[in-house]
Amino acid sequence: MKLEILPYKLPLKHTFTIAHQSRDVQDTLVVKLSAGEHYGLGESTTNPFYGMTLENMQSCLKLVAEKLVPMDPIHPEQLWAITAPLFKDNPFAQCALDIAAWDLYAKLQGKKLYELLELDPKKIPVTNFTIGIAPIAKMVEKMQEQKWPLYKIKLGTANDMEIIRELRKHTDAAFRIDANCAWNADQAISYSKELAELNVEFMEQPLPKDDFEGMKKVFAQSALPVIADESCITEGDVAKCQGYFHGINVKLVKAGGITPGLRMLKEAKSLGMKTMVGCMTESSVGISAIAHIAPLLDYVDMDGAMLLSKDIASGVEIFEDHVAFPDRNGTGALLL
């Protein structure tokens, strides 16, 4: 198999700000895994918060590419297990290869990925559309620009409740809020009461990732469900979240791809937790992969390509009430 490594810069429609960073352009890495005339595409964006750069991702993948040359296509789960030691501390690079492997394998089987996984594309929950931190007037403007039935509101400011109160005046859409670790337990519990009255579905990662003592208190006293993000990165984190969170948000790039992501979702379900998959502002390459596993989920955040001013690929199209899959096998992603 041959692996090509393709770096891109994804321009955003608006400056995207969360509690710990802002950006106008998102660096991303697309990989193309080829076997004869067939190929699969995978993607992972960079993230300074997790120390993932184009440089260390490319360096890691170049070493893996050498190992792939003599190999024939195998099931993605087998390939993930074989190559896992080569990725060490770079799950982002591992994710790009894993998505490409699933795309390629499904194509070789003559199936769309959701068909390979025996999933029903009609059972996909509505994605939220994310509103990043900005002056309140700008956040309102973003909502009015993209009318949507469900918004995720990024918080972590000195005036978080003022933001939600004002946004609520301009839409009847449901809200989810994501504080990205910015609050303490008492804040989260106090805010949850009013947030529940303002039609907020749940709070995502309100506390720092290691504050499980605080989360136990929030879990017991919050008026809203709480979903783990930064506290649930890899497979070993899922069981740790039971009794502290009502659900988990799996990010494929953080977990190392679809392969471990599917295992995490299965374990969370077995533990009675809600399941969600989120994105990291990927292009339609990464978003298309998420869409194919979305029938497994209670919630999904796959608006990454919708936040771009220019996409580098075509793939799934996301509408308010459904997802349209292209008439192509695999994930359906195609570089433009």
Image (cartoon, helix red, strand yellow):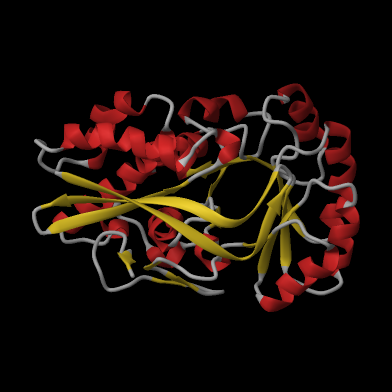
Residue depicted at x 84% and y 46%? 192
State the image coordinates of residue 331 (x, y, percent, origin top left).
31, 60
State the image coordinates of residue 297 (x, y, percent, origin top left).
50, 52
Look at the image and tell me whether residue 273 can be seen: no
Left or right placement of residue 169 versus residue 172 in this view: right
Numbered label tally: 0
Question: Quadrant of residue 175 in the image?
Answer: bottom right
Residue depicted at x 67% and y 30%? 209
The residue lying furthest to the front in this view is 55
Left or right placement of residue 155 versus residue 284 in this view: right
Residue depicted at x 42% and y 56%? 8
Quarter of the rendering occupied by the C terminus: bottom left
Picture layout, residue 267 above or below residue 19:
above
State the image coordinates of residue 216 (x, y, percent, origin top left).
75, 27
Q: Nearer the viewer, residue 43 or 108?
A: 43
Look at the image and tell me whether residue 68 can be seen: yes
State the image coordinates of residue 270 (x, y, percent, origin top left).
49, 35
Picture layout, residue 46 above or below residue 243:
below
Question: Quadrant of residue 219 in the image?
Answer: top right
Quarter of the rendering occupied by the N terminus: top left
Question: Quadrant of residue 14 in the image?
Answer: bottom right
